[in-house]
Amino acid sequence: NFWLSEGTGSAGDVIGDNLEQNARWEEPLLRAFDEVTQELGIRGILFCHHYLQTIKTHRNVYQLMQKFPRLILMDDITWPEEDMLHPFLGYLPPQDRTLLFERNPVALNFLLDTEYIGEGILPSAYPRWFQHNVQESQRSGVQIAMGRVFFWDDGRTDVNFNRLNAHMFTRFCREPGLDAHQALTDAAHEMFGPAIDPRLIEILWQTESIVKQVIGINGVDSFNHSRFPSPQYIDALYTPRDNCMKAVDDLFSTPGTKLYPPLTDSLNNYKQWRWQNKTVSRSAETELAEKRQAAEWIESVLPDVEKHAAALAPKHRDLFVNGYKILLVLAYGMEIFVETAALHYQWAHAKTIDDGRARTTFRALSSRMREVAATMPANPFGYQQQMIEFADFLDTKIPRISQAKP
């Protein structure tokens, strides 16, 4: 999309070859935008986000914008998604990062509605993440920090965990060096009242890294806008082309395998995450251990969450208790997702497991996923149905591959 500031206006829908040719058609649009904002006596913001950008099309926007230095150039703190798994502006090669700040005032977009990491339903308070990116923005010369609220969390930023993020973000913009734990404490007091038990705040503080363990697989976030991963993401064989970046089959290559491509102008979202993190494959057991550790930690704190949240207002009690119960079931489900993806790689690619044994194991994993789904609390994401659909896929849609070695 050619966005003139997200949430405010969108000038057309640009895809495929049109995006690749953006250097040819975007300049007249920018000129018109610049002239109109001058006539109105206002500043214009161009948000150059597009999910399918390449290194070259991204650079084209920066170069075109230099012809219109009045316009503010806005981009993402991380891209293609903001998921806490990738570095600040890590999608830009050094020369393009320099180009970003060369002539235009720069704004960066922060997703305080946690589109990809909980949407305020999960216990999604991220003091370290937002402080780090505010500090990096300040060091880099960013002039405007844009915090998006009420967008992907169904307009409920003020009543879910994202309220904490909005509070902390604005504090960090004024005081980048503020102690992050203190920022979380102050935000929790503002939202839940000064009587909130310090143990709940401490659990929230520790949860930030746990969410990363639940959603991430070696730097890949297979969740779909905070929803449970599609079964297609176990392997690029099944994945729609525009989302193959979320497929995890290559992550289960022989440990130590280099998974990132060389930097070229054609590098797009499909391999951006791997390029940014210089991803190297790890053992399946390493990936499973992260999920099990996360589940064990959530199990260990859940009694304290239930105990201390009981003293809060009912709506806040339910926010805490349901959030942690949902996160726990997600951790169980993601362990099964990882087991399934690892098995699928051994069966379909490495050919180290025979067809009959693989199918028997797929059926067992399907049964386990159904059992886990049955324990999922009610939630607006539809997690239970998504887990059932995952199990259905294993039961009915895995193609027969009989070339595997016995």
Image (cartoon, grey):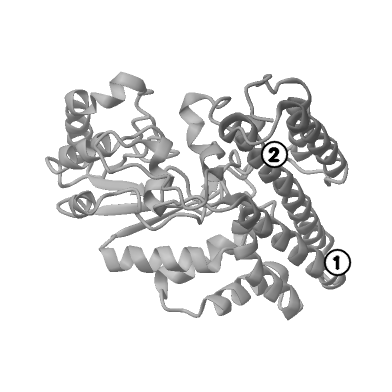
Q: Position of residue 304 (x, y in %)?
A: 83, 72
- Residue located 83% across and 44% down the image: 372
Amino acid on which the number 1 mark rests in the picture? Glu
Where the N terminus falls, by quadrant? Answer: top left
Q: Position of residue 366 (x, y in %)?
A: 80, 34
Asked whether residue 234 appears in the rendered view, the answer is yes
**Label 2 amino acid?**
Thr
Nearest the camera: 23 or 260? 260
Q: Is residue 293 left or right of residue 52?
A: right
Query: Along the horizontal axis of the image, is 321 left or right of 55?
Result: right
x 75%, y 37%: residue: 382
Whole-Å distance between the Cαs marked 1 and 2?
32 Å
Residue 30: image quadrant is top left
Judging by the rendered image, the residue that carries numbered circle 2 is 340
Badge count:
2
Q: Secondary structure at mark 1?
A: helix
Whole-percent x, y for residue 296 in the image: 77, 64
Question: Who is closer to the viewer here, 236 or 72?
Answer: 236
Residue sitting at x 27%, y 63% = 140
Q: Nearer the viewer, residue 8 or 46?
A: 46
Residue at image position (22%, 34%) is 36
Pinpoint residue 41: horizontal percent, then vertical percent.
22, 44
Label disc, if present, on residue 306 of the rendered structure: 1
> Which mark is first along the chain, 2 or 1?
1
Give the position of the C terminus as an image quadrant.
Answer: top right
Is the C-beta separation of discs 1 and 2 under 8 Å? no
